[in-house]
Amino acid sequence: MMPVVALVGRPNVGKSTLFNRLTRTRDALVADFPGLTRDRKYGQAKIGELEFIVVDTGGIDGSEEGIELKMAEQSLAAIDEADVVLFMVDARAGLTVADEAIAHHLRRCEKQTLLVANKTDGIDADSAVSEFYLLGLGDIYQIAAAHGRGVLSLLETALAPQLEALNATRHEAESEADEQPDEEFDFDELGLADAMEAMDRLEEEEAVPFEDLPIKLAIVGRPNVGKSTLTNRILGEERVVVYDMPGTTRDSIYIPMQRDERDFILIDTAGVRRRGKVHETVEKFSVIKTLKAIEDANVVLLVLDAREGISDQDLSLLGFVLNAGRSIVVAVNKWDGLSQDVKDDIKRELDRRLGFIDFARLHFISALHGSGVGNLFGSVVEAYQSATKRVSTSMLTRIMQMAQDDHQPPLVRGRRVKLKYAHAGGYNPPRIIVHGNQVKDLPDSYKRYLINYFRRSLQIMGTPIRVEFQEGD
Ligand code: GDP
Ligand code: GDP
């Protein structure tokens, strides 16, 4: 599961600067959901192979009173959800009362906290930061977020256990691979047809029976779109084996269920089934919970509210689902009691704004009355099957060949780009690797054409496809 790093500190210490550096071009999810009184920003970041979530908690200056204090407490609730807190101070401004107030809060939280002195560029940093030892938070990590200095080693320390765990699993995988050396195919000697047959055989031998695994289905959406109502509706209709799982407030509830003889695990982000004396956060909705559920799901059921239209938050969530390569089904909820005119308007808006996921199935449902809910599962299974479809090298190569025959790749520097063969590179989401000459020069329009051709020929619905290009054999 992806670790969560929270950036905490008074305004102007450089939290946004560090946030932007860590998340780079990736979209930030700005949480101004109703019920959250302070903006927080959530983004995805990566160090080596390790992906993690960064949260900019917004400014707390520690002097809040009354309503302000309540708001600050909400910001501090975000700290609850984090694995590591980076407490940022400004090396140039020196120690302030606000820093002391925040440090006081953090010491009470008992979270793993690293004290980070920012803006250490162009000053005598060692002497500037020494007064921060008074905060009683141990070592001080010197960085210059604006220039990136010290950031990598800070993260390596902050996420050391997670990085170690990742390396351990990779080593395991590698030593397993060592035991079964990759078979190398000499295309010239074997002939392309023979080599492809051999590769297909290998692929079949390796096949994991995806059909036998339960489908992990996450129900996500903004607050009040109807997630709890829908989850209850689904569970009310099914035989459910409910068991309470211990967990923190940031964890979703995993509910095993069956439908049409197929096993599912419902990932309930709305907390419908949470019972007992589990500590409740100030807010019911948690962005981190949602992001983690998406990451862990096979298929995401994104719930929209027909009456609210599509908001930027919905699009951010959608972007996150696609970035994560997850399959998706969209449920437009509260479709009851609307006039035909209104329904037509909503459909037009959906067409316009969701054009970029034309491969996803759209359902119009009423979680309240149950209409349309039953049909969701057909699309969920279809999306899962699409994401895990096993396609042989010979089949992919044939489709690629047909695409090439229908529409030749362009000339680049007087030579025609030539596609030779294609094979599967992975599942969930499906990856297809295309080999050929000068493929790196293929224009994006041709790549899109190929992706669509693969999608149509293989009838892949509800899941993004990744096509990668490799030069030569
Ligand atoms: P936030 O309010 O904590 O999010 O702080 P910002 O990221 O908006 O930064 C506040 C100011 O500090 C901006 O003018 C930044 O350009 C500046 N700043 C941030 N990081 C550095 C740094 O490493 N060195 C210097 N010299 N200035 C920085
Ligand atoms: P959540 O925050 O996403 O879990 O949303 P809830 O399930 O708590 O629903 C929020 C509100 O929308 C509640 O008042 C529900 O009764 C209402 N609601 C949910 N689904 C429907 C629906 O299909 N039609 C109508 N009219 N109201 C709904």
Image (cartoon, rainbow, N blue to C red):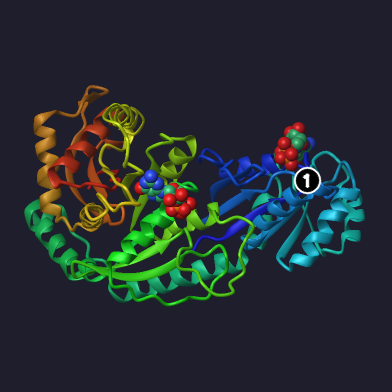
Depth check, front residue: 20 or 434: 20
Q: Residue 437's spot in the image, x, y percent?
A: 23, 37
Secondary element at tag 1: helix
Q: Is 112 situated left or right of 443 in this image?
A: right
Q: Is 17 situated left or right of 295 in this image?
A: right
At x 19% / y 70%, what residue is drawn?
261
Q: Quadrant of residue 319?
A: top left
Q: Quadrant of residue 235?
A: bottom left
Q: Is 293 situated left or right of 42 in this image?
A: left
Q: Is 295 situated left or right of 45 in this image?
A: left
Q: Is residue 221 visible?
A: no
Give the residue number, with chain letter if any, for mark 1. 68
Q: Residues within 10 Å of mark 1 (few under 14, many from 20)?
A: some
Depth check, front residue: 194 or 390: 390
Q: Which residue sits furthest top?
A: 414
Q: Residue 274's spot in the image, x, y percent?
A: 49, 69
- Does the Cβ of the disc 1 residue fall within 8 Å of ligand 1? no
Residue 215 lies, with reference to residue 142, above or below; the image says: below
Residue 265 lies, with reference to residue 302, above or below; the image says: below
Q: Residue 16's spot in the image, x, y percent?
A: 67, 40
